[in-house]
Image (cartoon, helix red, strand yellow):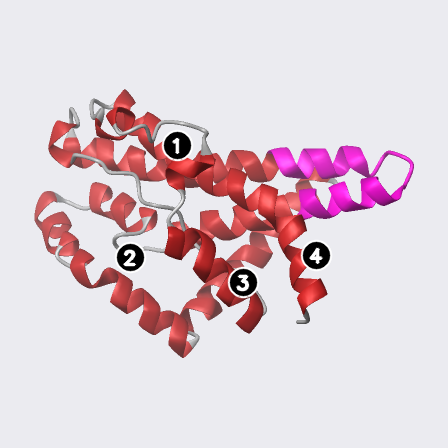
Amino acid sequence: MDFNQILQTLSVFAIPAIFAITLHEAAHAYAARHFGDSTAYMLGRMTLNPVKHIDPIWTILVPIVTLIMTPFMFGAAKPVPVNFNALRSPKRDMMWVAAAGPLANLAMMIAWALIAKLLLTLTPSAPLVFLLRVAEAGIFVNVLLMVFNLFPLLPLDGGRIIAGLLPDRLSYQWSRIEPYGMFILIGLILTGLFQRWLGPLVNGTLKTLYSALGF
């Protein structure tokens, strides 16, 4: 990918990616406060201000590097802090706090798809084509972020949802994986095993969405 292509891709993906990451993290913060933990709220993380959710490495450097070196862009925001013990029913409520992020991405995915469908009914023009590409990027980014975070491994949201569903003893044993979770995830990505799981689910979700909305 040459420099001009990189700039074009960044211009298309920048706004959808910022919205996807910001609303994902803000949803976690909102859900945590709803269930009794105001930690994220007190730290200013229950906000739609993207600056509050940016991590210099994972939100800026990693997406640029992966965009240059791989066929896709990968990144993450600064995790929202949650005080497990402050939740009214920690095990159950943490499951909903975790699910809030992917659910926010699901809502944004549908919203971007409706915008794209509306744009397709308008008279084509250069600005309209660009906006359509932005909407398509918004759909893809949110599907990718939703499916990625639902991977059943701690500390990802999918891992926390499983922890909430398991019986107490098994949930405790499952939670002991968390310190090694990111290392396991990196290993799965480097070996290509993670992509084999991610790709079909992302493509299947996109096909289902497009089919449901009549694209």
User: For mark 4, what is the residue?
Assistant: 8
Above or below: residue 188 compared with residue 64? below
Would you call the spot at circle 1 few (<14 residues within 10 Å), some (14-19), or many (20 or more)?
many
Q: Secondary structure at mark 2?
A: loop
Alpha carbon distance from label 2 to label 4: 34 Å
Mark 3 vs 2: CB contact within 8 A = no
Quadrant into which the N terminus falls: bottom right
Res. 165 visible in picture: yes
* Residue depicted at x 68% and y 42%: 135
Dot 3 or dot 2: first in sequence order is 2
Q: Is residue 108 magenta?
A: no
Alpha carbon distance from label 3 to label 2: 18 Å
Dot 1 or dot 4: first in sequence order is 4
Above or below: residue 190 compared with residue 78? below
Mark 2 vs 4: CB contact within 8 A = no
Q: Is residue 116 magenta?
A: yes
Would you call the spot at circle 3 few (<14 residues within 10 Å), some (14-19), or many (20 or more)?
few
User: For mark 1, what is the residue?
Assistant: 26
- Residues shaded magenta: 111-136
Dot 2 or dot 4: first in sequence order is 4
Alpha carbon distance from label 3 to label 1: 28 Å
Res. 70 visible in picture: no
Mark 3 vs 1: CB contact within 8 A = no
Q: Amino acid at mark 3?
A: Pro
Alpha carbon distance from label 1 to label 4: 28 Å
